[in-house]
Image (tube, rainbow, N blue to C red):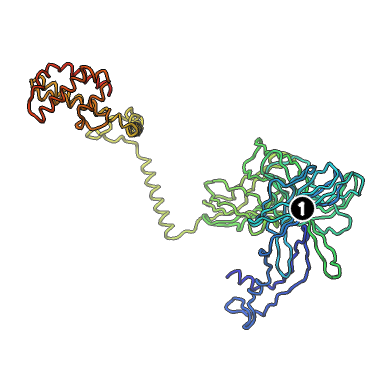
Amino acid sequence: MMLRKTLSTVLGISLSFTGISSFGQITNSIRPRVATVRPFRVVQGNLQPSPGGPDVFDSLVSSAASFDMDSPVEAKAEFDPPVATVGGKVIYRVVLTALDESVKVPDQLPVPPGLELHQGGRGQSYNNVGGLKLRPQTTILYHLSVTNTGTFTIPSFEITAYSKPVKVPEAKLTVMSAGSIAAYEPPHLFLQVPKEDVYVGQALRISLVLPDTGDGNVGGLAQAKIKGEFIFSEPFSLGMRREPIQRNGTNILALIQEVMVTPLREGEQEIVGQAHSVSSRIVPGQTPVFQSTSLLVDSDPVKLNVKALPEEGKLPGFTGAVGNYQLEPPRLSKDEVRAGEPVTMTVNLHGDGNLGRLSPPQVPLLKQWEGFPPVADNSLPPAIVQQRGFVSFTYTLVPLSDKVDATTAIPFSYFEPRKKIYIDLTIPTVAIRVKPAPGGDLALKEREADNASKSQDLAEEDKPPVMAGLIARPGRAASLAPLQQRWWFLGLQALPAAGIGGLWAWDRRRRYLEQNPGVVLKRKARRGLRKQLQAARRAAARGDTNGFVLSGINALREACAPHVPARPESLVCTDVLDVLPRAQREGESGQLVRHFFAAADGILFGGTTREVTGLLAQQSELEKLLEQLGERL
């Protein structure tokens, strides 16, 4: 709604924009087109169009340019120049009618033997396709090195645009021997970098130089910028001029465009400049109409040695300012305030540096002043601040006492790259008159209460010190040492660690037994074997033959159960014999087992039989066999 109200008050003039034709050419027919605006009338403070007329907002929106994103993507490729000499400069240029962000180029192009490509500049512009429609165009440059004569062809290949393949046509280059034809070099930029030492955070003015072709048609440079891995290039230019320069011992006329960059890391940095060279000519057959052409040009890589800011000699209040600065006397919003009332202080900083992105110093912590973070003049973009030549900071200060007579000094310093030293530029104090805070009934009551408490404190201080009496019963404390300094407190700290260690050991044991169930079965078998063996011994001591036989059979079952595996009560004589080695199975041990199981069957199913007779005398043989089986558990 606010945008609608704002645009409703604007009388717009729309121009048909410059666009790019083939190979980066911009075709522009400048035809002023004035939007039709109905008279306004005021309704409750708002501007409204007169009844019956078209909506002004809709008229302005409909007159705005739109982007052509529906047309098929076209690709073109060429060598500039198409005929070159050995050792000359050649540019391979690829142009696509698509947005730069959507274009993906293969890492390796199908370059024929004898040619060597180096990645160059890459930029985007727009082409007027009729009416107010603009079609985006992306230009990609490659630099060639040719050492042999002949005809070279880069075959057709595919580039991805909008996630779809686009076919780039082939391009041919003819290379002739040096001196056979007049040498021609494509438009090329040169960078003029500072010769002095360069430091991290320093704002540099780097000139992009484009030699004039001599016909006077080059009108300027557009979208000038410098690229680098750890280089921040400002999105604005500092002005363009045309002046003679000396190149290879010859004075030539050139266009010079300055760009501001800031190195972000120390070390050797590689920078490359690029821009669109704009020229104009009269369209044949249309004398009053001019045609503008734009060609993407770039420079060779240039090495820039960036130094780190020295740590020695750094002064308080340094916020990263590098350059040469001057400070105006600070100004207060008012010269007289009461304690507790805020006052604003404005500081203007001039100088040669990146003023648009300078961080202001912070207010130091003081008892008599309360300061808030400074506010920079963000209403203007960095480009305007840089051209204006100064930046303003606003501090909000609150005096906490009526005894102060001046603002606090704010430490500030900057690094001077030419002198290679830090320079103090502390914001000075400003005289101010601070009155006491306004009074009233509440203030008087608070002052009286404060005076009463002060009088009571003074009276207490005047009394002589007297030791208090001893308590009748002893307290719980047995020592004057604090708890954290007693011996048992250290042991108490080990309890959580011991608990965690115990849980860890228990869980480790549980996992081990879960993965090895035989360990549990053998442990249970040993326990059952001891129990049944003790029962058999007690029965033998009583002379209970039946109890001795049954307990002995149960002991044999407990000892053999983990090897079957099965429950002990389910084992029969054959199962026990299978556990015994073959020699024992066919020897006396096997006969003993058969005799005991036969006697047990007689006891359980047929009453006492003759097989039970004499088994008590074989107690030692049974215990020996059980001991051998227990060793296997």
Residue position for label 1: 170
Q: Determine the secondary structure under disc 1.
A: loop
- Residue at 58% from the left image edge and 57% from the top image edge: 336
Q: Quadrant of the C terminus?
A: top left
When asked about the image quadrant of residue 313, the answer is: top right
Q: Quadrant of the N terminus?
A: bottom right
Total labels: the figure holds 1
241 left or right of 550 in image: right
Q: Residue furthest bottom?
A: 52
- Visible residue check, residue 237: no
Q: Nearer the viewer, residue 392 or 139?
A: 139
Image x and y of residue 498, in percent: 34, 31
Few, some or many residues within 10 Å of mark 1 (<14, 14–19, 20+): few
339 left or right of 105 in image: left
Image x and y of residue 246, in percent: 88, 47
- Visible residue check, residue 549: yes
Q: Nearer the viewer, residue 403 or 309?
A: 309
- Residue at 66% from the left image edge and 51% from the top image edge: 357
The amino acid type found where label 1 is placed reads: Glu
When asked about the image quadrant of residue 513, the answer is: top left
23 left or right of 463 in image: right
- Residue at 65% from the left image edge and 38% from the top image edge: 314
273 left or right of 608 in image: right
Q: Residue furthest front?
A: 586
Q: Nearer the viewer, residue 237 or 211?
A: 211
Q: Is residue 63 above or below residue 103?
A: below
Q: Is residue 52 above or below residue 248?
A: below
Q: Is residue 496 above or below residue 609?
A: below
When asked about the image quadrant of residue 240, the answer is: bottom right
Q: Nearer the viewer, residue 384 or 606?
A: 606
Image x and y of residue 322, in percent: 69, 44
Image x and y of residue 371, in percent: 55, 51
